[in-house]
Image (spheres, grey):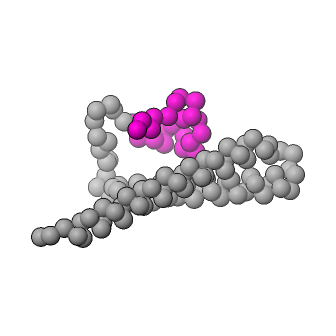
Amino acid sequence: MDLRLSPSAGSLINRPAAALPPVQRGAAPVAKDESQGFSTALKGALNSVSAAQSESARLAREVQLENPKVSLEETMVAIQKAQIGFQATLHVRNRMVQAYSDIMNMQV
């Protein structure tokens, strides 16, 4: 299954390009600091999903209040981004729980 995003879909991500670490093809990303690890990346991803959900809820509320500065299209895109982020987070959580269960069921 190929999960690559097209260049036009890259603009939907809330992070500016300067905030993303440079990734070289074929090389694993290296943390600049020992304190930056999996837990930091996971917290950042969860905060990003939470921010997307908050933004979509705010936009939906503004559309319901008939704010002329907020378009329905913008709101629908924000809701879809939040939904996709939540689904991805749910899949990661399920995989982590499955991996934990597999490790705990291993015979030593």
Q: Is residue 23 above or below residue 84?
A: above
Camera-side residue of 22 and 3: 3
* Horizontal side, residue 6 vs residue 22: left or right: right
Is residue 84 magenta-colored? no
Placement of the N terminus among the 4 image quadrants: top left
Across and down, in percent, residue 64 comes to 83, 55
Camera-side residue of 9 and 101: 101
* Horizontal side, residue 40 vs residue 71: left or right: left
**Can residue 40 be seen?**
no
* Horizontal side, residue 11 vs residue 20: left or right: right
Magenta: main secondary structure equals loop
Q: Quadrant of residue 108?
A: bottom left
Is residue 19 magenta-colored? yes
Across and down, in percent, residue 48 comes to 54, 54
Single out the residue that lies furthest toward the top.
Answer: 7
Across and down, in percent, residue 97 comes to 36, 65
Total numbered labels: 0
Q: Residue at x 26, y 64 (%)?
A: 102
Query: What stretch of residues is rendered in magenta?
Result: 1-22
Q: Residue at x 42, y 56 (%)?
A: 92
Q: Residue at x 28, y 40 (%)?
A: 28
Across and down, in percent, residue 42 comes to 42, 57
**Can residue 43 be seen?**
yes
Q: Is residue 48 above or below residue 106?
A: above
Q: Residue at x 32, y 31 (%)?
A: 25
